[in-house]
Image (tube, rainbow, N blue to C red):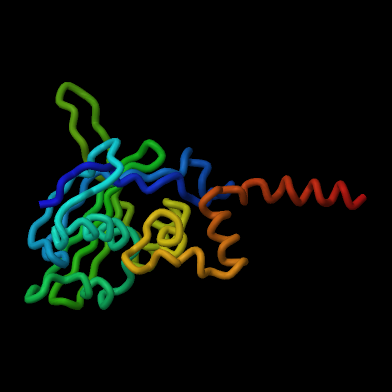
Amino acid sequence: AVRQTATARLGHLGKRSAESCRHREGRAIRPLTCRARNFVGYADLDFTYPNDVCAIVGENGAGKSSLARLVDVALFCGDARELAAWLRRGEDELLVELTFEHADETYRVRRTLRDGKSAKLDLEIQHLDLGPAATERYEPLTRETTAATQAAIVELLGFNRETFRASAYYAQRDGSAFTNAGPSEKKRRLVEVSGVEEWAPVNARVRADLAV
């Protein structure tokens, strides 16, 4: 079994624009829990990412990389064919679910695969109903198509899969994703991570003033 000795904190990431980010402050996301059925080596997984952890350690083949990979798959997995690549051998149904915290809100993203080829993506936000018996409920944020829901996830987070993989998550044998990128691509990813594009109008105004 994997020993839980670290938090899966994904870092302060995000693209912040005046239009897309007025409703949220902060760019960090923190995985809280994950569930998976028939995900690579896991037949049945329910895992809570601990707070204030710096590493997940365990024997070779214990599934350490899968716990990190699950975050990537839940947030950014593409079509049914890509999702099927994570299906446990001999099975034809897959569930990947991630609950995470972002900008003081809790979200849940769920991907399912049926018959090895029919994929579905759902996005939800948590609401706490306070009262004598406090309860929690999830409001659907799922769009009309999978592509539209995926776009909503990227808009919510403020970064895409390429930036995620080049800054916060290095898959095995993929450590050169940033260093091998060209200068313009490196600049784009750094801008997304740092959020400095918010200062672009100020920079443009200063340049215009200096040109006078």
Residue 139 seen in this snapshot: no
Residue at point 26%, 78% (across, down): 81
User: Image height check: is 113 above or below 192?
Assistant: below
Q: Quadrant of residue 30?
A: top left
Question: As drawn, which residue projects farthest toward the right?
Answer: 212
Residue at point 8%, 58% (across, down): 44
Q: How many marks?
A: 0
Residue 188 seen in this snapshot: yes
Question: As drawn, which residue projects farthest toward the top?
Answer: 132
Q: Quadrant of residue 149?
A: bottom left
Q: Is residue 82 left or right of residue 36?
A: right
Q: Is residue 168 left or right of residue 1?
A: right
In the rendered image, residue 12, in percent from the top left (x then y), is placed at 45, 44
In the rendered image, residue 112, in percent from the top left (x then y), is placed at 19, 65
Question: As drawn, which residue projects farthest toward the front?
Answer: 59
In the rendered image, residue 145, in percent from the top left (x then y), is placed at 34, 67
Q: Is residue 11 left or right of residue 86?
A: right
In the rendered image, residue 117, in percent from the top left (x then y), is placed at 20, 78
Residue at point 27%, 49% (across, down): 108
User: Image height check: is 40 above or below 24?
Assistant: below
User: Image height check: is 12 above or below 79?
Assistant: above
Q: Is residue 93 left or right of residue 124?
A: left
Residue at point 34%, 45% (across, down): 9
